Amino acid sequence: MPLFGKKPASKTTTVFFATDVHGSERTFRKFINAGKFYNAQVLVMGGDIIGKMAVPIIQEGPGHYRATLQGRTERFEGEEALQALRERIGTLGFYSKVLEEGEFRALAADPSRVEAMFHDLARERLESWVDLAETRLAGTGIKCYVTGGNDDYPDVLQALHRPNAEALVACEGKLIEIDGEHTMISMGFSGPTPWKTPREIPDEELGLKIEEMIAQVADPSRCVFNFHDPPVDSTLDTCPLLDWSTDPPTQIVKAGQVVLHGAGSKSVRKAIETHQPVLGLHGHIHESPGATRIGRSLCVNPGSEYGEGVLRGVLLNLAGGKVESYQLTSG
Amino acid sequence: MATAAATPEVFTRKASGLVRVMSPYSAFIYNILTMGLIFPWTYLWAPGALPGGKLVWGILLATVFEIPIAFAYVWLSTALPRSGGDYVFQSRAFGGIWGFTLLMSGFVIWILQWVALSGWLLSYLGFAPLFLGLGATTGNAALSEIGVWFTGANGIIITSIVNAFLSMLLLVSGFKNYVKVQYVMFYGILVAFATTLIVLFTTPQAEFVTRLNEFAVRSGGVQNFYQAARDAVVGAGIDLNPPFSMLATLLVAPIAWTSLQWATYSAEQNGEIKEARSFKNQVFILVGSLIVTGILLALLAMAFERAGGTEFVYIAGAGYWSLIPEASISGFNLWPNILAVALTASPLVVLLIAFGYIAGAGYWSLIPEASISGFNLWPNILAVALTASPLVVLLIAFGYILNSFQIVNNCYIGVTRIMVAMSLDRLLPEWVSKVHERLHTPVNAHLVYFLASIPVIWAYNKVGGWIGLTLGVTFACGYVFAATSLAGAVLPFRAKEVYDASPGASYKVNGLAGLVLMLIGAAAFVWTTWEFAAVFAATPILLWLVRLLGLAAAAGVFYMFRGQLGGWVRGTAMPWVTALGTAGAGVGFAMVVAFLLAPQLGVLGNWDFSNLPSSLWSQIIAFGILILSAVWYFAAKAAQKRRGINVDYAFKEIPPE
């Protein structure tokens, strides 16, 4: 066997997979452009697409603003500076909203209004992303499949279901024909997390949902399992063990050291071990990128660096029910 | 259900998040340990090789030269806080060929030499004194024979391989296990270092010669050691009171850089450091550890010179550089910590000092009189010689063994992370990056590096002259650090969005002032190239080729900024990282060039064309490693292309628009 592996079959489908962009405008734009850039026919987004933070830009006077970003309060003036800051905030995966001082104080005092604001801002961004995908991918033949993750609000994810969309497909819960040879099923829910995120369920329930979907698949060995939660103890799910009783959750330290563990799903692992799909696409644990094999199944987690504006992904060449080659990217 | 909350002027919602395991303080300690207060090359090498050079000023100069480099790493680390540091920074700024070639050659291959070095230190300065000391204190000849075995090539090779193997086992068992040992070593070294300083600063100068002579006798050396060493050194034509030399003082800096260039090694683990994006944290980790270590090393130099006087410094240096045996005690050179041990009568002090130290005298100068019974004045040897207690001997050796062991761990930790990053980029085979499911560590990368170290360990101890390449690591790692500094300089232009989103983006300097800093770096590089090209004086074509290449390289750097130069001249703001990164790269590459062209700085600077190719073997190895790495890159790229993988995709940024 050659040092770097064997030559691929002639007819392949190139899939580009990325995940956990968490609202980052810049990384999603890169994701949409990745098809042309990498010569991929299929784009798959693995979930956790909604941002985690909103930065109020407080108007102190006509054309004068202040905002707190990465722990630093910055003051600036003019519309050009305002636009530059909003772009920077978007790159980091945050939302921004211009508010008067009084509006900000009132909003900050009412958590339910803050929650509603998040939903509105997230929906607005997701709708703009669907527009972007439809515009940029029109006529290219590139298909873009997007699923939600455990961090995403269910009501906001409805924005992905646009009836007349041609390029972008909300793929969660559907059996997708990737090409003439391979299919894909998607699951954005995860097992329980210490953060109590919007779409997490007991692991047993997750297993039942997965089995329901697999029942629709004619040949699991040629199917791609696009499951947000990685298989437990797979090296794609390594992260610190956390104390769930504190808010926010804190790391458990023993003998002065942070305890690491596999935080993935037992049900996902069982499904892969049992059905041996051609490929497992996973995310969820940003700090554990890599690739591994569970039996014949290649499982990948590209990790995430959305905060740096870097799109981490995996390019995969599929042919004849096999992954001929793959490559982790950092674009 | 998720809830949302307002923290000061920011709204956050509950969502899962990235968690990192290494605290900034741990990273700070890691850098100090990597810089190695236990690597006191400067104290004997510099006086021996560079008469007239001022130790303290040379060390402080090296610290100042490293500061802009460390700051460039601060910007890079906060913009790209990922594991694989230098490899990530360079491949993003310059492309895969540069990132791979420089890191593969400078770190992955050259650091194998340090794996061998740590084994040598462990055997020669850890186990040999242990058994010799135990043999002497218990009157057991068999133990002494075991000690002698540890000083022979076979003993060192076997010890080195076991050393590397145990380190591999420790690290694959989990990084946390290493970190536990790290804290023990850190505080042990600090205690030993402080004790050494106190002994050297408080010993009355009037008693210095007497105490040293007594120690030499107890260690099996000659009577009246100091005078015998002095006579031998003077007899060898060495001036014990040379006039001050600015050039020699400048050349002390690259030697001190052997330690101080490692201030930025934690960047390889940025992906594991908590709040690695924090500018303040990275300044503390990178610049803070540099300044603390620089000051400590300078204080030690001051104490060393104060204890025995300037004349003694040159005697000790002659033992190391000129190989005058009379100027070492039992073959051990007069390193500061050995001296401190020799000057104290307290076994406890000896223990404290030896616990944290490595030393080695007579190493460089090879004057046999400058050693005692063939051993140079390494601190632990002196400590062993001063005590009559087997328990103390055992404890001293244990501390020394721990320090030697730490070095091999550092080699593995940084290099295996880079190898994993290269494998994930498809430039090393896929199995190199495989992570063990239960241990969560890249077992294969560790195993590959262990296996690769075995032939180097053999060569280090069996091939004549190979040991002289040890500080070639400073040259090779130096070009990696300097190139990364340059990567920092171009970051705002080659990865604009990444830079703009980083916390350091708001720090700007007046363009004209920034240009001055850039010019200082360029001038340092051009001057060094011009001055030391004189090594080719007998071959004018080479002389002028090197000088012109130096000028062209400096001009090439400014050409990279051709679009901005006009604005900067008019005072347009320049990113601070561009000014500091260019200045740091200038002085960094100047020191790299010094290693390559100045014979005072080791075998790479000895250009002897009389008996090719054997007379230039070290240069052939150094450049051969670079060429081999570049060839590997193109071969791997071609192999992956046949599999439908474009390696360039690993480094190229997708345009967002």
Image: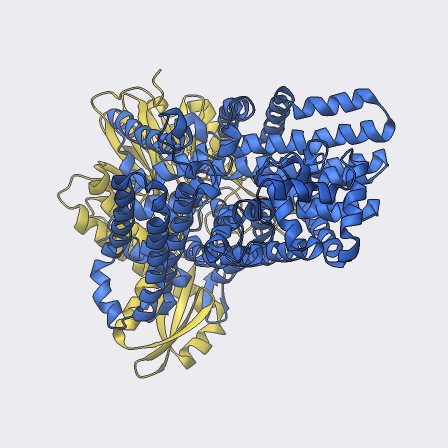
Residue positioned 85% across, 31% down in the render: B137
Using the image, determine if residue A209 lies above or below residue B312.
above
Residue extending furthest toward the left = A139
Query: Where in the figure is residue A217, as x and y percent of width and height?
Result: 34, 27
> Which colour is chain A painted?
yellow
Of residues B628 and B219, the one nearer the viewer is B219
Q: Colour of chain B?
A: blue
Res A9 → quadrant:
top left
Residue B285 appearing in the image: no
Q: Residue furthest top?
A: A1
Name the residue furthest bottom. A61
Q: Name the image quarter holding the C terminus of chain B.
A: bottom left
Q: Quadrant of residue A64?
A: bottom left
The colour mode here is: by chain
At 81% across and 27% down in the image, what residue appears?
B135
Q: Is residue B361 above or below residue B248?
A: above
Circle count: 0
Q: Quadrant of residue B389?
A: top right
| Residue B429 percent coordinates (x, y) | 39, 26
